[in-house]
Amino acid sequence: MMRMNLLRGKEKFLLGKFFNSVRNCSSSALAGIKVLDLTRVLAGPYCTMILSDLGAEVLKIERPKVGDDTRAWGPPNIGNSSCYFMCVNRNKKSVSINLKDPEGQKIVQELALQSDVLVENYIPGKMNEYGLGYENLKTLHPKLIYCSITGYGDTGPYAKRAGYDVIASSIGGLLHITGPENGDPCKPGVALTDLTTGLYAHGAIMAALFQRERTGLGQRVSIDLLSAQMASLVNLGANYLLANQEAKRWGTAHESIVPYQAFATANGYLTIGGVTDRQFRELCSKLNRLELADDSRFLSNPKRVENRKVLVEEISRTFSTKTNEQWLAIFHDATFAYGPINTLSQAFQDPQVLHSRIVQEISHPTAGMLQLVGPPVQYSASENRIRLPPPELGQHTDEILQQRLGYSPSQIQQLRNLEIIH
């Protein structure tokens, strides 16, 4: 009885607080938007981080004592968490609640009823078991935008499978087209399918928020890793569907454009793109190989693709005669695209990267001063920035229960004693 009395009579309080709330005046595009984040690992947290950078208040619901899986995905670690966790959880508040306990589920439902957006990435059906499925919440809160991120969608032969980036990337063809020509398939260095899915989810939520301004109603938005990966095949997918052309691995080269790849120099690699006939001629001039531009085998891109092997061999021999630094000096005023293949230390010291100030600093309670890669998008009339460090596990539990839900300190302590919160 005591456990139920802790949560009785909250619905009226929450609904009144939500529907009578006044949006904050701020230069942030999403100021006043409340997001309930029930996601873990990468795709979901990446989506909600983008929303938080734009000013949304994001509450990250985490398991007591354990939290997001990625908190333990180290080394390397910093403070009490892994560097992996730090990369996608800034600007969020951590609330640690036991979702397996019915009263924990009730607390999350109360938070959902005063939220604009809920994002979850549980296996299909799990949120329904917790009483937190879309149909459960839609009846109580028709303005809620409910975003579900899954591995393979809600239905179909793979619906109940665990969804991870490298598996969806494998099934969706990305690993087949990544790696050296005639070599083994390779995983991209970062989880591109997860990131793509997170970006799709963020854009879909923004569109749903915009539509809600016109209709007054929320909706469910669904995105899965495999569909996002298939959509990201772009030209290669079209080549197969429209021309029945199977894709293959090309290393750094391009299937339809030559030259457009990396070349070894005397001390590293440079990537160049002579994508038009004019740019190809300019490249040949910079290489002091104008005879290649006048060669009948290379006069057009289709001819260059047809004679790829001999052209690449000729260009490769020339690139190997000078260092990266020498070629970069020669190319300094070129109109074709070029750049070195940098290590991370070189990338973070690149003059254009330094100029962009994309690396930002913020103080963290246990890790000290953090350097994080900030938002890449700039707005002329709104903020998009790091405001809060990645949270400690459960750091904001008491604050949110008191300020958002009206719980008293004694109620919070009882919930903690019952291990419903942490």
Image: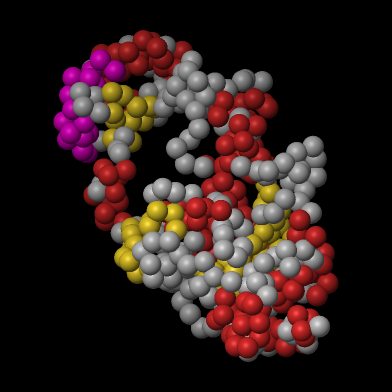
Q: Quadrant of residue 337?
A: top left
Q: Quadrant of residue 151?
A: top right
Vertical side of 248 occupied by 360: above or below: below
Please tell me which residue lies in front, 87 or 304.
87
| Residue 205 in view of the camera | no
Q: Position of residue 362 (x, y in %)?
A: 35, 67
Vertical side of 278 occupied by 189: above or below: below
Q: How is the image coloured?
A: secondary structure
Quadrant (top left, top right, bottom left, bottom right) of the N terminus:
bottom right
Asked if the stretch drawn in magenta spans residue 247, the answer is no
Please tell me which residue lies in front, 297 or 72.
72
Please tell me which residue lies in front, 211 or 282.
211
Q: Position of residue 170 (x, y in %)?
A: 61, 31
Q: Quadrant of residue 406?
A: bottom right
Side (left or right) of 163 relative to 276: right
What is the tally of numbered marks visible in this picture? Answer: 0
Q: Position of residue 134 (x, y in %)?
A: 78, 63
Side (left or right) of 9 relative to 167: right
Residue range in magenta is 315-333
Q: Position of residue 396 (x, y in %)?
A: 53, 75
Side (left or right) of 190 relative to 32: left
Quadrant (top left, top right, bottom left, bottom right) of the C terminus:
bottom right
Q: At x 41% / y 15%, what residue is drawn?
A: 308
Q: At x 47% / y 41%, what residue is drawn?
A: 190
Q: At x 68% / y 43%, what residue is drawn?
A: 162
Vertical side of 400 occupied by 320: above or below: above
Q: At x 68% / y 75%, what residue is drawn?
A: 418
| Residue 127 in view of the camera | yes
Per the picture, the main secondary structure of the magenta-coloured stretch is helix
